[in-house]
Amino acid sequence: MRLGVIDIGSNTVHMLVVDAHYGARPLPAATHKIALKLSEHLHGDQIGESAITTLNDYLDRARDLIEDQGVEDVVAFATSAIREAANGDSVLDQLSERAGTRIQVLSGTDEARMTFLAARRWTGWSAGNLLVLDIGGGSLELAIGLDEEPDSAVSVPLGAGRVTNNLLPGDPPSPDVVREARRAIRTQLAAAVRPILRMPNPDTVVATSKTFRSLARLAGAAPSAEGPLVRRTLRRQDLKEVVDLLTPLTATQRTRLSGVSATRSRQVLGGALVAEAAMDLLHVDDLTICPWALREGIILRRLDTLSDVVTDTTGWIGDV
């Protein structure tokens, strides 16, 4: 079937059309995205009118793409930026009407679970006890387990955009600011990772998300042009060198580095500090970049639900 996925994230809003069939790898057919950075459009704890207007215009274009591409089924979800906004419910009602389908807000734990499902399907059962790390714009998700459902999953409000906005003022931030941000990140994360550390040691560690892909590229991994099947890794020691490289640079200077886009240059240091803290506190020496993440997990769960011929009375995603 041809499936459309609308992902309203903290950094980007992404419409993906895939040819997807149960038991087969979803194949991208069309895509359209914008770098909205919703976390930067909050006025107090409210999503601003300019962001809502941009989202409505985007959804108009997404509906055109759905019609043009012959999409049979649409799933739509939003993550931390809308989840945590005081006016999130009213914004969702407005956006759902514009999109022509109900937009479901995922909890942080469900983000971790769906990302874990995608990583498990990509890596396979031979990965054994699997640990998955994912850094978004608003939150960091961690999950570990032996099956397709993680044994432990946590979400921490330490996304690259959030850390940058809250902890890293200045361009570039001063060494004292970076040092204090590093301390604050590790203090918050040390308490959050305890459920993960109580689990058996992982056999395989993977990371998803644009942030980790950019950091791996900065550490020497193959560019995205070489395709998703090329193995890309990130070592903790190399990541420390990446942090040292990024710290004195302005956002403009960072765009001259391989793997850093203009839309992500401001927050890549924040993402690097979170990634470094996570690898340190979880005792991860190296990890592999997984090209599948939350969107693929949503697609796979949707296909699983359809294959079981389950009547979905609670929403498009089934029982997450």
Image (tube, rainbow, N blue to C red):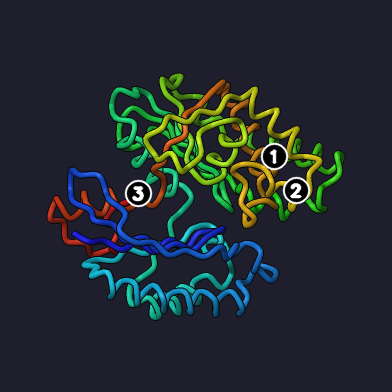
Q: Quadrant of residue 290?
A: top left
Q: Is residue 163 left or right of residue 15?
A: right
268 or 30, nearer to the observer: 30
The earlier-in-sequence mark between 1 and 3 is 1
* Image spot of residue 310 (x, y percent): 16, 56
Q: Which element carries disc 3, helix, strand or loop?
A: helix
The nearer-to-camera label among 2 and 1 is 2
Give the CA distance from mark 2 to mark 3: 33 Å
Identify residue type, mark 2.
Gln
Other residues around mark 3 within 10 Å, as few (<14) / some (14–19) / many (≥20)? many
Q: Report the residue marked by disc 3.
A: 296
The nearer-to-camera label among 2 and 3 is 2
Q: Is residue 245 left or right of residue 89?
A: right
Image mark for residue 185:
1
The nearer-to-camera label among 1 and 3 is 3
The earlier-in-sequence mark between 2 and 1 is 1
Q: Report the residue marked by disc 2.
A: 253
Q: Residue at x 50, y 44 (%)?
A: 209
65 or 191, nearer to the observer: 65
Give the CA distance from mark 2 to mark 1: 24 Å
The earlier-in-sequence mark between 2 and 3 is 2
Q: Is residue 146 left or right of residue 111?
A: left
Q: Which element carries disc 2, helix, strand or loop?
A: helix
